[in-house]
Amino acid sequence: MRLAQLIYDVTKQFPDSEKYGLVSQLRRASVSVPSNIAEGFMRRSTKEYIQFLYISLGSIGEIDTQFELARRFGFAKENEQLLDLITTLRKQLYALIRSLKRKI
């Protein structure tokens, strides 16, 4: 959830011309991360949960790439807090997936 908050804060400063471009993409991907974790958790099987965790990882990859594009286009400055959070979440999700895979 913190990732989504950071993305919403960062994208407030983007130009209006990006409202339907990178702003929309970044915000949807950031909301997708906790949403897919929650949806997967509510599924009936560990295998399904793992699949939703992989979808969350994909969304984190999208955010990482899209933020780098925004930075290169001059819409955003380097944001260590955001980049550190992306790295931390990626590691946590991989660790959770490994742990769940041991159960099946």
Image (cartoon, rainbow, N blue to C red):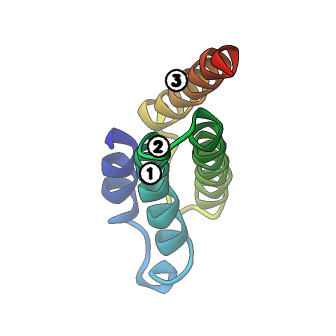
Where residue 64 appears, x then y in whole percent? 62, 46
Q: Which residue is mark 2?
A: 37
Q: Earlier in the sequence, mark 3 or mark 2?
A: 2
Q: Dot 2 surroundings within 10 Å: few (below 14), some, or many (20 or more)?
A: many
State the residue lying farthest toward the front. 44
Residue type at tag 3: Thr
Residue type at tag 1: Glu
Q: Nearer the viewer, residue 103 or 55?
A: 103
Count all numbered tags in the image, as a single digit.
3
Residue at 67% x, 59% y is 69
Residue type at tag 2: Ile
From this view, report whether residue 23 is shown above or below residue 19. Answer: above
Tag 2, which secondary structure? helix
Q: Dot 1 surroundings within 10 Å: few (below 14), some, or many (20 or more)?
A: few
From this view, report whether residue 33 is shown above or below residue 73. Answer: above
Q: Quadrant of the N terminus?
A: top left
Where residue 16 appears, x then y in whole percent? 41, 83
Q: Which residue is mark 3?
A: 88
Q: Is residue 27 left or right of residue 83?
A: left
Q: Nearer the viewer, residue 43 or 36?
A: 43
